[in-house]
Amino acid sequence: MTKPVPADVLSRLKSVLGEAGWSEDPDRLAPKLLEWRDRWRGTTPLLVLPKTTAEVAAVIGICAEAGVAITPQGGNTGLVGGQIPQGEVLLSTERMRAIRDIDVDDEVLVAEAGATLAAVHEAAAGVRRRFPVGLASEGTATVGGVISTNAGGTQVLRYGMVRNLVLGLEAVLPNGEVWNGLKRLRKDNTGYDLKQLLIGAEGTLGVVTAATLKLYPLLASRAVALVGVDAPATAIRLLARAKEETGGGVEAFELMCRLGIDFALKNIPGTRDPLAEAHPWYVLAEFGSGEPGAAEAAMERFLERGLEDGLIRDAVVAQTEAQAKAIWAIRENQSPAQKPEGATWKHDVAVPVSQVATFLEQADATVRQIVPDARITAFGHIGDGNIHYDVLRPDGGSDAEHSARREAGSRRVHDLVASLGGSISAEHGLGAMKTEEARRYKSPVEVAALEAIRAALDPKRIMNPRVLF
């Protein structure tokens, strides 16, 4: 339980931030204290809204001196509850939105933590560059948030996780000191890489205030297709072919089951069934190339060969940008489409690509031993082995009963993931949801090392104290 924040500390925080830099207004706080799926609700004695790195440092310095806990928050799009305070001071980066610099020669963009991914994409496009992190929540998700959670997204297959796309960071450490590591070097082999400790640390080792991000040239050609297939094993065979056909130019390779399509058709206005007939599974494939026409040609060859060999049952290729967006909307609306359907066990897991089909088959069998009539929908980034495996309550069933089975059911799913050499959190992080459970799957040696790192940088454990080891 977080201890109450002394009145004098609250007064000092208000003083250093000025009237625009804090709020106690319940209406202002309400959306920041609720996780979008309604699973976590929080409380805070004060919302602080620093505008500059110096103000972040002042806030953390005051809290460090008093031993007061802080929960950092970006766009509040996290899915494991790490951004929802339970009595801690809530530090929002929403006022730190500046794009500080763009350099085409270095191919970098320097953005403050509160800048949204959409703002980064727009700024990069202005100089004919792109930042290849694609999330359904990009209009709300922030630079600081995606870095602190080491977000993934749909383009990990080609570009890697966020940690692969960050060259430098500026951050305020748990003692209130500012570390300026906003380098833009591809090579810097001078000891421990502090930025990599902060990436994925979920705000436990400091607050990221700005970042130097890698940019890439715009694609000269792009092809998007939706493909109907019989099984996940078929999709994996097609993935290998896609890589060969493009010479590594696969931008995304996404898997969806039919039930997820049905939910989108039912619950997302404007969604249209993508193919003439229903199929058990669907692959959304996107190819990209720096050569005009090359992506489209590669897609045509890929689809022709798959149809001839009986791996592809049907396919549609986007002929316009609007059609490409419509195809992608089906994938991006998989989670929102579930929300009206009732209680769900959510799993963000990763297994080796070679084990995806095995995982899906065995997970279904495991879940049906617990809830025979559960509605199971799986979707995700098959190109990197990340599956969002979601178990919805039976149609017409009780939300309360299904939620009561969540812990036991998820434990069985996660045990299966671990047995296949996988991870119980592929891209969402541990947060409040999985921190304690993760100890079950990490060795004592690893946990001890992680605890030692945290104790060295945050000995008072004031930074997001409910999260990580």
Image (cartoon, rainbow, N blue to C red):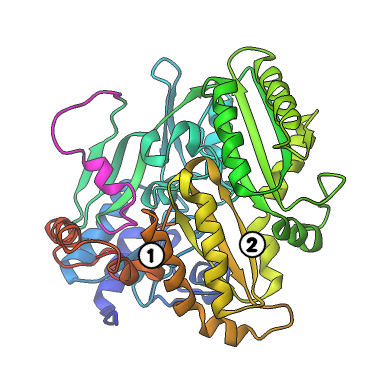
Q: Residue at x 14, y 29 (%)?
A: 190
Q: Give above or below for 387 relative to 316.
A: below
What distance separates the C-alpha of mark 2 from that of mark 1? 23 Å
User: Of 25 and 458, which appears nearest the observer?
Assistant: 458
Q: Which mark is residue 377?
A: 2
Looking at the rendered structure, the secondary structure element under dot 1 is: helix
Give the residue type that dot 1 points to.
Gly
Tell whether 441 sits left or right of 165: left
Q: Main secondary structure of the magenta part?
A: loop
Residue 467 picture quarter: bottom left
Crowding at mark 2 (Cα within 10 Å: few <14, some 14-19, many 20+): many
- Quadrant for residue 289, please give it: top right
Report the residue at 24% width, 55% height from top.
205
Q: Is residue 106 depicted above or below 141 in this figure?
A: above
Of residues 60 and 400, the one drawn nearer to the viewer in this rendering: 400
Give residue 84's position: percent from left, percent from top. 43, 69
Q: Residue at x 83, y 52 (%)?
A: 270
Residue 84, compared with residue 424, is above or below; it is: below
**What are the residue bounds of the magenta stretch?**
185-204
In this rendered view, identify the residue nearer to me: 8 or 400.
400
Residue at 49%, 71% (x, y): give it: 33
Q: Which residue is mark 1?
A: 431
Q: Is residue 133 above or below residue 204?
A: above
The nearer-to-camera label among 2 and 1 is 2
